[in-house]
Structure formats: structure tokens, C-alpha cells
Image: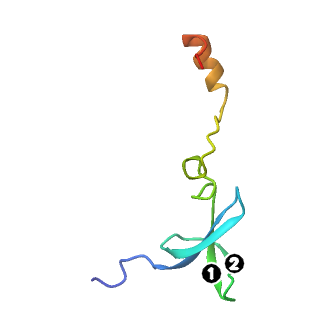
Amino acid sequence: MQKDIHPNYRPVVFQDRAVDYAFLTKSTIQTNETIVWEDGNTYPLAKVDISHRSHPFFTGTMTIVDTAGRVERFERRYGRRNK
């Protein structure tokens, strides 16, 4: 293995902002924030929008996210969808 070409592989805390859940794992992600973890050590913090605790596939709650009227635009073009 060549020296000084690989990223720093270190423990990082990932925090899911949607459900206020955090977990510690190893990663090469670069962050500017840090957090004091349950063991008393300080680790880099990476905030994420979705994780296995908030993803609809794992939670079983499917939601339709209507961004900028996409559903209405589709219905105007192709007609109302049947449920």
C-alpha cells in the first residue's frame, strides 16, 4: 500500500436530523463539526437527512413528497390517477 495517498479512515458519528438518531461507525468523510459521544470521546460529526431509522422502506411509512407541484403537473398532462 502506498503511503500518503489514502484518505483518513476513522470513527465518525452520523446523526439523522429527521428522527434525532445518531450512530458511530468508521468513514473517510471530511467534517468540520465534532460531538462528544456516549463513551466520553470526541468524534467528527456528519449530519444526514435520512438513515435506516427514517427511510420509508425500513419504517414502513410511505409518503408522497410533492416537490414544486409535480403531481398536479402530471395530472394535468395525463389525467387524474386512479386509486
Q: Look at label 2 and name its amino acid.
A: Ile
Residue 79: give x, y in percent of width and height: 58, 10
Q: Is residue 81 above or below residue 23?
A: above
Image quadrant where one finds the C terminus: top right
Residue that carries the numbered disc 2 in the rendered image = 35
Query: Residue at the spot x=61%, y=51% of the render?
Result: 59
Q: Which residue is mark 1?
A: 43
Q: Secondary structure at mark 2?
A: strand
Q: Residue 12, percent across and down?
A: 57, 76
For the N terminus, give its image quadrant. bottom left
50 in relation to 67, above or below? below
Residue in the image at 69% along x and 78% along y? 35
The residue sitting at 42% across, 76% down in the picture is: 7
Whether residues under marks 2 and 1 lie with C-beta atoms below 8 angstroms apart, the answer is yes
Q: Position of residue 80 (x, y in %)?
A: 61, 13
Q: Quadrant of residue 19?
A: bottom right
Relative to residue 1, is residue 31 drawn left or right? right
The answer for how far apart the CA atoms under marks 2 and 1 are is: 6 Å
Q: Earlier in the sequence, mark 2 or mark 1?
A: 2
Q: Disc 1 marks which amino acid? A: Tyr
Quarter occupied by residue 15: bottom right
